[in-house]
C-alpha cells in the first residue's frame, strides 16, 4: 500500500480498531496504482461528475486486509503516475497537487453530504493532515444536511500551501478566501481550512497538542489553535501490536518475549552479519530508523558520532527521503568506520524489524515529534529508546532514574535540551546502563510490558465521533 510515515500507519490501523468497537468506519484513498493493485476484487460504486477544474472520477470499492471497506478514488490523470504520492521521480512536488488533493477532499465531503453518490452517508468525516483539509470547508459551504468533521494533525509543519488563484479552480466560493476561511498569509492553506472549519481537532499526542499552541511549534497557526483549544484533543497514536511483536515476528532472526530475553542477542548477531558490522557482543549497538531531516535531530547524532564510536559502540542507520547533506554525512561515516557504522539509504521493512530486534538501544533525538512510533516499537522489542523530551516522545518514554527504576516505570532515556551535547550525555547514560547487568534487563522488561495498542485511543476517537454526530 502507499504510505508515508505515521500517517499511513494510522490511516490503516485506526479504522480497524474502530471496527472492533462496532463503528462503521470506511477509508477513502486516492486511486494510486499501488492501491488498485492490492484491490483485485474492487467494483465501481459511483461516478463523480467534473466540477470546477476537477476531471471526472469514479469511486471503486474494495476491502482492506483487516476487512475495513475501502473506497479508491479512481482518476488516472491525477493519481496513476510514476514517483511518489506527492512528488515525481526527481523529488519535485507535482505541480497539480492542489487539484489532486482538492479532489480527494471534495469527494470526502460528498460522502458526508445529503445527496451524496452512495446509498450510505457518513455521520462524521475524519480528515487526516492537509491532504483532506479542504473537506471541512466544502462541507461548511454545502447546502442541506451534512456530516460533522474532525481534523487530525499528524505534523503541523506540512500545511498544503498554494497560490490564492486556485480558490476558483477548486470550486470554493470567493468568500472562503479570508482570514476566517482558507487564507493563510496571502496564500491558500488546506490545513488552515481544516483547522478553521472542522467541528473538532485532534492531534497525535497530548504533549504535541500543547506544543502547537505556542509560537515555537505552531508554524504560524498557534493563534488559531489556541483560540480553538476547547475543541482540540491530544490522542496518542497506537501501534499494530500484531505486526510489531517480537514473539511472533517472522521478519527477525529469532523470536523472543520478555521472559526469553536471552534469545534477543541472536538478532544482534544476525543484524551485525547482515550489515557487515564487527560481530562483537561486547559493545552496544545503537540504531536509527528515520527520515533524514533536521526535525529528527540527526545532525546532532552526526556531530557526536566520534564520541559515540569511541565509547566504543556501533551504529546502524536506515533512512532516507530527507536532507542530502545528512545522507552524505552518514554514508561517509560508514565508509570511514566500516566495522562500526552501517548506513542504509531507503526503506526496507524486513531490515526495520531486524533493527528493532537486534539493536541494543534506539535513537530518536527529535527537535519535535508529534507522536513517533519507533520509540513504541522499540520498547515492545526490549530495545530501550533514547529520546528528546518533546511531543509524543515525552508522552511514551519514561526516563531511567533511581526512582523510576524502583517503581518499575523506567523504559528509556530522555534528554531535555535541543543540543548535541545533551544527546551525548543521554547516550553515555545508556551505555553505562547497558553494561549494568541489573539495570538493562529491568528497562527491557518494563518497556515490553507497556500497552501501546490502539484500543484505548480508538475508544477516545469513538467518544468524540458520538458527541459530534449528536450535534448534527
Image (cartoon, helix red, strand yellow):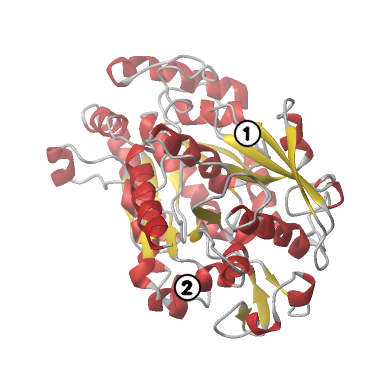
Q: Which of 222 and 140 is in front in this view?
A: 140
Q: Which of 178 and 226 is in front in this view?
A: 178
* x, y percent for residue 47: 78, 47
Residue 227 occupies quadrant:
bottom left
Residue 169 occupies quadrant:
bottom right
**At 60% from the left edge and 69% from the top edge, which residue is drawn?**
137
Q: Name the residue under label 2.
A: 218
Q: Please identify the residue farthest to the right as the structure is shown.
A: 77
Q: Which of pointers 2 and 1 indicates the residue nearer the eye?
A: 2
Q: Name the residue under label 1.
A: 338
Q: Do the residues labelled 2 and 1 touch (CB within 8 Å)?
A: no
Residue 295 occupies quadrant:
bottom right
**At 20% from the left edge and 40% from the top edge, which residue is drawn?**
409
Q: Is residue 62 left or right of residue 10?
A: right
Q: Which of marks 2 and 1 is nearer the N terminus?
A: 2
* x, y percent for residue 202: 43, 59
Q: Considering the numbered disc 2 on the image, is that residue within a helix, a strand or a loop?
A: helix
Q: Considering the numbered disc 1 on the image, is that residue within a helix, a strand or a loop?
A: loop
* x, y percent for residue 82: 84, 44
- Up-down relation of residue 313 to residue 400 (above or below): above
Q: Which mark is residue 230?
A: none
Q: Nearer the viewer, residue 433 or 29?
A: 29
Amino acid at each position: 500500500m502507499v504510505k508515508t510515515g505515521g500517517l499511513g500507519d494510522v490511516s490503516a490501523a485506526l479504522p480497524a480498531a474502530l471496527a472492533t468497537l462496532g463503528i462503521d468506519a470506511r477509508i477513502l484513498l486516492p486511486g494510486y496504482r499501488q492501491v488498485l493493485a492490492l484491490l483485485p476484487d474492487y467494483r465501481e460504486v459511483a461516478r463523480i461528475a467534473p466540477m470546477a477544474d476537477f476531471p471526472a472520477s469514479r469511486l471503486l470499492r474494495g476491502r482492506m486486509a483487516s476487512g475495513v471497506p475501502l473506497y479508491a478514488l479512481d482518476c488516472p490523470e491525477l493519481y496513476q503516475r510514476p514517483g511518489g504520492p506527492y512528488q515525481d521521480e526527481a523529488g519535485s512536488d507535482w505541480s497539480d497537487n492542489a487539484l489532486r488533493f482538492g479532489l480527494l477532499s471534495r469527494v470526502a465531503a460528498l460522502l458526508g453530504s445529503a445527496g451524496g453518490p452512495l446509498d450510505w452517508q457518513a455521520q462524521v468525516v475524519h480528515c487526516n493532515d492537509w491532504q483532506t483539509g479542504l473537506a471541512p470547508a466544502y462541507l461548511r459551504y454545502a447546502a442541506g444536511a451534512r456530516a460533522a468533521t474532525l481534523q487530525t494533525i499528524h505534523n503541523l509543519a506540512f500545511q498544503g500551501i498554494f497560490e490564492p488563484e486556485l480558490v476558483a479552480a477548486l470550486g470554493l466560493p470567493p468568500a472562503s478566501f479570508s482570514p476566517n476561511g482558507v487564507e493563510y498569509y496571502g496564500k491558500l492553506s488546506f490545513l488552515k481550512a481544516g483547522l478553521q472549519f472542522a467541528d473538532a481537532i485532534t492531534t497525535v499526542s497530548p504533549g504535541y497538542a500543547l506544543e502547537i499552541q505556542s509560537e515555537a511549534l505552531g508554524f504560524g497557526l498557534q493563534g488559531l489553535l489556541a483560540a480553538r483549544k476547547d475543541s482540540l484533543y491530544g490522542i496518542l497514536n497506537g501501534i499494530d501490536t500484531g505486526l510489531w511483536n517480537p514473539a511472533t515476528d517472522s521478519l527477525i532472526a529469532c523470536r523472543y518475549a520478555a521472559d526469553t530475553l536471552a534469545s534477543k542477542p541472536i538478532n544482534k548477531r544476525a543484524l551485525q552479519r547482515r550489515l557487515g558490522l564487527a560481530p562483537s557482543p561486547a559493545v552496544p549497538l545503537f540504531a536509527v530508523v528515520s527520515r533524514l531531516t533536521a526535525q529528527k535531530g540527526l545532525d546532532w547524532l552526526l556531530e557526536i558520532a566520534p564520541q559515540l564510536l569511541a565509547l566504543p559502540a556501533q551504529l546502524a542507520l536506515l533512512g532516507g527521503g530527507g536532507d542530502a547533506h545528512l545522507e552524505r554525512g552518514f554514508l561517509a561515516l560508514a565508509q570511514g568506520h566500516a566495522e562500526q557504522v552501517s548506513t542504509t539509504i531507503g526503506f526496507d521493512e524486513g531490515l526495520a524489524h531486524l533493527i528493532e530486534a537486534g539493536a541494543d538501544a534506539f535513537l530518536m533525538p527529535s527537535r519535535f515529534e508529534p507522536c513517533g512510533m519507533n520509540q513504541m516499537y522499540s520498547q515492545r522489542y526490549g530495545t530501550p529508546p533514547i529520546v528528546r523530551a518533546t511531543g509524543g516522545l515525552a508522552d511514551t518514554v519514561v526516563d531511567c532514574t533511581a526512582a523510576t527504576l524502583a517503581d518499575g516505570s523506567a523504559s528509556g532515556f530522555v534528554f531535555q535540551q535541543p543540543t548535541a551535547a545533551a544527546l551525548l550525555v543521554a547516550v553515555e547514560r545508556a551505555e553505562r546502563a547497558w553494561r549494568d547487568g541489573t539495570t538493562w534487563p529491568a528497562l527491557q522488561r518494563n518497556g515490553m510490558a507497556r500497552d501501546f495498542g490502539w484500543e484505548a485511543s480508538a475508544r477516545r476517537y469513538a467518544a468524540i465521533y458520538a458527541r459530534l454526530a449528536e450535534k448534527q
